[in-house]
Image (tube, helix red, strand yellow):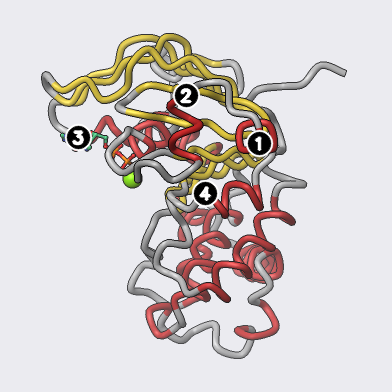
Amino acid sequence: MDKSYPLQTRNLNLYYRKFHALKDVTMSVEAKTITAIIGPSGCGKSTLVRCFNRMNDTILGARVEGQILVEGRDIYAPDTDLTQLRKTAGMVFQHPTPFPLSIFDNVTYGPRVHGESRPEELSGIVEQSLQSVHLWDELKDRLHEPALDLSPEQQQRLCIARLAAVRPRIILMDEPCSALDPIATSHIEELMEELVRDYTILIVTHNMAQAARVSRNTAFMLLGELVEYGETARIFQAPKDNRTKEYISGRYG
Ligand SMILES: Nc1ncnc2c1ncn2[C@@H]1O[C@H](COP(=O)(O)OP(=O)(O)O)[C@@H](O)[C@H]1O
Ligand SMILES: [Mg+2]
């Protein structure tokens, strides 16, 4: 069977005013795999993941050239439904970002925005979404407590549950473990390994060991350029580009 590629860019260039932040990036992300984007700080990793649900649109002076395809559709086509796009491709951020609402209201936020108001449906969604991130047993008796009272790991799981509640097919993660301790990090990595059965996951990480542990494919970026992209094991064991080799061996950070 042919592989499918729910996220693709073709000759993608992105400018923040005059600053050329993404340089001719062409890449295809395989379905239902974990793909990591690595590279030193400032190389454009966040900018690239933000492209896929048009999060850069809100940045004044940001301009995109080239094509970005999500599930084969050009997301800058005039008939693009942005709400639908962000439902298809949801984002998890560096710092957990629960809303200052109850656990229940966090998870039901998306479904409500999309028009679901039946109490039984909403309760079912909360149970299912929290189950999928292994928070249900812990939190089922505390659903009406403030989400901001949870631990950082629980908050990050809750943010993933909040996404799951709107049934995305793609999860974009921008350094989702950088605010977590090593144990919480390994828990989130285990969760990602489960989620990838159902979702396509694109994760930015500055942690090379994390990329090596969790991802099937790795993209190495430098100064806005996609330097090398391929199977993670190959990228780490036999990089083709000298710049990748130097980065992997820790020559620059
Ligand atoms: N909103 C912005 N306005 C102007 N420049 C930006 C903006 N966001 C990021 N940049 C610049 O674009 C480059 C890439 O940033 P970013 O995508 O955040 O890199 P990374 O995630 O790899 O650290 C950096 O040089 C950064 O300073
Ligand atoms: Mg970043």
Instruction: Confirm or reject: label 3 Cβ below 8 Å from ligand 1.
Output: yes
Q: Position of residue 131 (x, y in %)?
A: 71, 70
Would you say 146 lies left or right of 198 here?
left
Residue for badge 2: 242
Q: Residues within 10 Å of mark 3 (few under 14, many from 20)?
A: few
Going by the numbered disc 3, the residue's amino acid type is Ile
Q: Give the SS element for disc 1.
A: helix
Instruction: Confirm or reject: label 4 Cβ below 8 Å from ligand 1.
Output: no
Going by the numbered disc 4, the residue's amino acid type is Met
Q: Which circle, 2 or 3, is nearer the viewer?
A: 2
Q: Which circle, 3 or 4, is nearer the viewer?
A: 4
Instruction: Please tell me which of labels 2 and 3 falls first in the chain.
Output: 3
User: Where on the image, by quarter, is ligand 2?
Assistant: top left
Q: Give the SS element for disc 3.
A: loop
Q: Give the SS element for disc 4.
A: helix
Residue for badge 4: 208
Relative to 216, residue 240 above or below: above
**Quarter-of-image position of residue 124:** bottom right
Q: Give the SS element for disc 2.
A: helix
Residue for badge 3: 59
Going by the numbered disc 2, the residue's amino acid type is Asn
Relative to 30, residue 32 above or below: below
Residue in the foreground of this view, choosing between 191 and 185: 185
Q: Position of residue 104 (x, y in %)?
A: 52, 74
- Which residue is drawn at the image coordinates 32% and 34% (left, top)? 43
What is the number of the mark on residue 237? Answer: 1
